Amino acid sequence: MRELYEFAVGPMAWAAFGVFLIGSVIRLISMYSLARKKDGPFLSYMSWRFGLRSILNWLIPFNAQGWKENPLVCVTTFVFHLGLILVPLFLLGHVVLWDQYWGFSYPTLPEQAADIFTIAVIVACLVFAWRRATNRTLRFVTTGQDWLVLLIAFLPFLTGFLASQHVGPPLVMTTLHVLSGELMLMAIPFTRLSHMIFGLFSRAYMGSEFGGVRHAKDW
Amino acid sequence: MGIEQRRIDDAGLARGMAALTPEKIAKTFQALIAGECGARLRTYVETCMRCGMCGPACHYFLSHDGDPSYAPVGKVSETMWKLLKADGKVDPRVIGDCAQIAYTECNLCRRCMHYCPLGIDTAYIISVVRRLCHKLGVTPMYIQDTAHSHSATLNQMWVKDDEWTDSLQWQEDEARSEFPDLRIPLEMEGADFMYSVIAPEPKFRTQLIYQAAAIFHTAGCNWTMPGTPGWDNSNMAMFSGDAEIMGRVERYHFETAQRLRVKRIVMGECGHAFRAVYDVGNRWLGWKMHPVPVVHSIEFFWELLDQGKIRMASKYPGPVTIHDPCNVIRGRGLMDKLREVVNHICDGVVEMSPNREHNLCCCAGGGVINCGPPFKNVRIVGNKAKADQLKATGVQTCIAPCHNCHGGLEDIIHHYKLGMKLKFLGDIIYEHMEKPGAV
Amino acid sequence: MQNKASWDWEPGSRVIADTRDCSGGAEWIEEPYVSPDGERVAAVACVGEAQFTLCANGQPWENVFDKIWYPRFSPDGRLTAIVQSDGEWTLAVDDAPWEQTFAYLWGTRFSRDGSIIAASIQQDGEYGLAVDGEPWEGLFENATDFALSDDGSAGAASVQVKSLGQADIATFQQGVYSIAVNGEAWDAVFVNAWNPSFDAAGKRVAAALRHSLYEYGVAVDGVPWKSRFGSVWEPVFNPATGEVNAPGRVQGKWGLAVDDQMAWPARYAQLWHVAFTPDGKTTAAIVAPEFGSFTVAVNDRPWEATFPVVTDLALAKNGRAACLGSDCNKNFAICVDGRTWSGRYDMAWTPVFSDDGANVAVLVEKQGKRTVVLNDKVYREWFDTAFPPVFSPDGGKVLIRGISGGKFMRIVVTPDAFHA
Ligand code: SF4
Ligand code: SF4
């Protein structure tokens, strides 16, 4: 088990970050060159001002019409993404690792806050799953991949939480946690999770068209 | 739930499906994806989280009690995703279903873009489905006929060259009994603007040309209308998926304005035509923006009232409500000017909710009404939400500055027995303005 | 065409007429039109309820009509207008209406020298062309895209040769259109047949086609090219070689096809308005090398100067080229041989070259006033309205035709009357 753990935090971590970073860059570049080749005219409407305006407006909870009319999804989505960003980056246990391997550190989340965010993400995942299972529209359009990516996002938080609460054998839980986190990193460029990379662009494009050409808001 | 339960017979769809083979479908689909689709489509398909937030954006979805097959994502899933998954290897029947969804169950109204956090352009995806159906020849008969008309006459309704100028001269004659020196100046090079209309105006609704001429005459405008094809600003080829004819129509429209050396094109109260001229046709032709500025009537009336060129003798007795046409509101941001004009010419406004950029579509737009009688009920039943919205205002008059909206709302008002009157801005301005030159 | 050499080229300014002279007894007079030589100015005058006449240099025509529109001077200086009496339409030329009248008449067109005048007509619901008052023998259910050969000897149109029922998409797609030349349709029918155009001799005709909803092509004298395109624009004949040139779209890009072969590879976002020099050695077109940026390509070499919009390509006999570039109909610039003039205008008209190609003059408008620009130098006077300039045969003088305060002035100037 120890070897597996060492492998997970050692070579595997390198591989995971590598796949995530290089994969994302490659996907971005290839999508951009595809856009230049095939959607050139549309790229020419991209505007920083209106793109950012749209993104910012969508980052405010209950601001866009879509958020207003889907309050549960709105709350769940914001909580989920907030946790998804804060916990991995600012958890004490993670920052310690940065320090250990790379020799740098930065402020961390108070432990309690981290716990709350972790639980929040877990609950959010359950809400997502519940909607996917019961909401008529979601049932109509859900595919296996939608469940898979939900599971991929859920696992690191579940295992992390269990490990922090000392449920199960610590080494096993920690190893599972690390592996599932790495799985998620590696999945980002190649699954629907890529909306993390592309979502900003599709939103910015829509914002540019609405703002710059059509003089209307898009939220 | 699902298109299988609501298939509608249409001669065009049936004829198209009968001529298809699975091989032809696959070949055409693959060529379309490889040739005309790029990063946009790929990004949209890949990043859509199937979150369903876009459901309540769509009036079809709302009117059908949340039937998921009418949700924007539901319609995309039944069409483009299905086709992509099968790499186009589907039966003709699937193409027929795709066509029915794409042409008659989506107005390309873009309301769902206000609901999707990722900015997924469902209207674009549905347009790609229409493009495919056009390439496969599976299009509803009436809209196809309209596209044929555009190709042969450059207008929507088979209006012949002489019928066009003849009807303008007729309206000029008619109007001279009210304004003895009124002109509808034809082919007058160097005028300030060219006025363009949609083909139903010379064909059936000549009164609208009369009204516009009366308003321009009273305001002392320096204007002209073309005496050649290129006068029609409507464009159903844009909605049938025939981009080539769409481009041809817009080329002639713009080149007619350029030939007449006008500063701007002022357009009648039509929404889809505005979309075609404002930011769709020009792109296919390689112009980043419209090569001649394009001004919708809402904005032009606003100018005339703002500059005092038109004064109201009385106000239209209200209160009225305002229908925001998608293509000039989400498509051009004219919501404030529309309200200023209406408040200026009418006595009191009761707003619908939601409104402005979040308005519900009339369900006639995007070419849906042009698919003709077989699909009339699809529009009416599919827009109960709008009927409820109209009813809740409790007013007697609805102002809708768009031809398509008039068509759609008229049917809804009739069917749901709302007892409302529908008005164009031009109707009211003409009726209630000061007419110093009239006898 | 009037012999330009016989015009008055004596430098100086003459008031030809006061356009208001016609207004005696007239309820209103409409916008003015001027003859090519600048010796006459004419306008439609309303002389009573539903009574119209044309008034030239203050002299009304003897004939009075119920309606008049489209007053135009022919290149040989004759004054024409479309007129209606008792519900019947015809064309009046110098106060003489054609003998034959029609249910409708429109689209006056002239041979290059103006000696032949033609117009589109509708009679009993059938359509065709009338040349010097004589309608085609064969008329059609519908006809559009009329063309007259340069010498006026032949006319053509896109015609409908089979009837269509209501929403008859099947028959349409089998093809009901063809091209008629002098009233006789080609044997072949097409889904669409557009933009017939004649060769220099007026003998051959080329047209753009749609073979099916998806395949575009070109036909010459009824025989289609083998090539198929995603779309085409109007074909034109090279005046010297007789080759047919047509912009064609291949995989989303435009190129120029010549006699059924791609001559300019399809690499443009747009390519249209193909023009030639009389010797046929220079072919130019308005092109967009990239989406959103337009210019002129001469023999497939685009200029470096680009604009959001380019219109009005003009070629001189010696191969020089000029066009208008604009910022979507504002800030018009004149670009000659790829060099953009410094002046910017609210509106501009097609550039005019002197016969030797050495000079370019353009009618321009700024703040509602018009004048002429010669080689980027502006004429000193601005007019309420003005008309395109004309060069003297030797290119050394410019005829300016302008109206100010109602007075129509004919001004002949030498280049020193223009200032930077
Ligand atoms: S009709 Fe409008 S809201 Fe509904 S799917 Fe189409 S574009 Fe979206
Ligand atoms: S709201 Fe956007 S991401 Fe969600 S299902 Fe609809 S299209 Fe997909």
Image (cartoon, coloured by chain):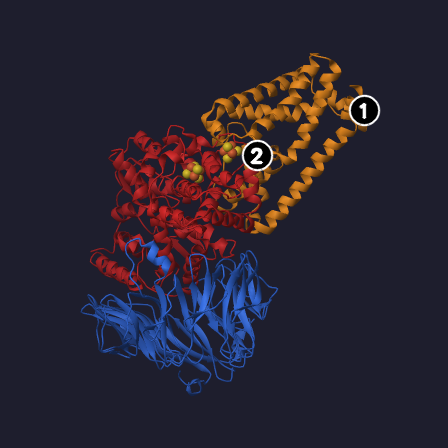
Chain colours: A orange, B red, C blue
The residue positioned farthest toward the bottom in the image shown: C6
Q: Which residue is mark 2?
A: A56
Disc 2: which chain? Answer: A
Does residue A2 appear in this view?
yes
Q: Which residue is mark 1?
A: A100
Asked if B274 appears above or below B165 in the picture, the reply is above
Is A168 displayed left or right of B370 in the figure?
right
Foreground mark, 1 or 2, reads 1
Q: Earlier in the sequence, mark 1 or mark 2?
A: 2
Identify the image quadrant of the N terminus of chain A: top right
- Residue C397: give its label: none
Nearest the viewer among C397 and A24 is A24
What amino acid is found at the position of numbered circle 2 in the picture?
Leu
Label 2 crowd bin: few (<14), some (14–19), many (20+), radius 10 Å:
few
Nearest the viewer among B189 and C174 is C174
What amino acid is found at the position of numbered circle 1 in the picture?
Gln
Whole-angstrom CA distance, mark 1 to mark 2, is 36 Å
Q: Residue at x 53, y 27 (%)?
A: A61
